[in-house]
Image: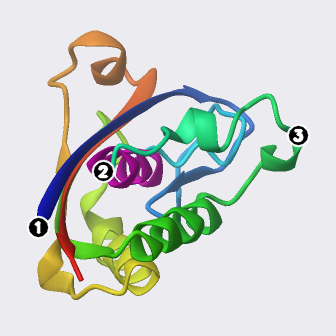
Amino acid sequence: MYRIGNGYDIHQLTEGRDLIIGGVKITHEKGLLGHSDADVLIHAIIDSLLGALALDDIGTLFPDTDPKYKGADSTVLLKHVYSLIKSNGYEIANLDSNIIAQKPKMMPYIPKMKEILCKILGINFDQLSIKAKTKEKMDAVGQGLAIEANSVVLLKKI
């Protein structure tokens, strides 16, 4: 049996925060605003995993009203969510994702993101796609005010 999940996230860029995407600290003058570390890619992946099994979404599972998630490392949240997936008898067949940012350029960081995420999810590089896109200077992302990500995952019954 297979299950498909779709995830999406967006965060505003702001001064005074580190920019962390896919578990990687990226050199940039701004970071993403959020209750946790605001890692848009991991948040989109988490929602795709949860959605595939019709479980809660990231905001329900890790509410921004709970102080224990203030500044939380999203890789830790992802590990927890993937343990839920495994405990429900599923594993990842493949995961496809996009990071949408006008700047900074994401391509130099994608190999390290894949390394981190594949290790957490127990998958091979050929099971994970991370692509970088821009918005061609249109909307909030294109104007450099935000970064967004989306993810689609195919789970298979173990």
Task: Tell me: residue 4, above or below residue 145.
Answer: below
Quadrant (top left/top right/bottom left/bottom right) for the N terminus: bottom left
Tell me the amino acid under the disc marked 2. Answer: Lys
10 Å crowding of disc 3: few (<14), some (14-19), many (20+): few
Q: Which residue is mark 3?
A: 67
Kindly report the secondary structure that dominates the magenta region of the rendered protein. Answer: helix
10 Å crowding of disc 1: few (<14), some (14-19), many (20+): few
Q: 72 and 79: which one is in front?
A: 79
Q: Name the residue rendered at 19%, 26% in the picture.
A: 135
Decide if residue 30 is in sight here: no
Q: Percent x, y for residue 15? A: 68, 31
Q: Which residue is mark 2?
A: 105
Q: Which residue is mark 1?
A: 1
Upstream in sequence: badge 2 or badge 1: 1
Distance of label 3 from label 1 (alpha carbons) = 38 Å
Looking at the rendered structure, which numbered label has been put on residue 88? none
Q: Name the residue rendered at 39%, 78% in the picture.
A: 121
Q: 93 and 109: which one is in front?
A: 93
**Residue 27 inside the magenta-drawn segment:** no
Tell me the amino acid under the disc marked 3. Answer: Pro
Q: Regarding mark 3 in the picture, which secondary structure is present there?
A: helix
Task: Tell me the mark number nearer the camera, choosing from 3 and 1.
Answer: 1
Tell me the amino acid under the disc marked 1. Answer: Met
Does the residue at mark 3 contact the one at mark 1 (Cβ under 8 Å)? no
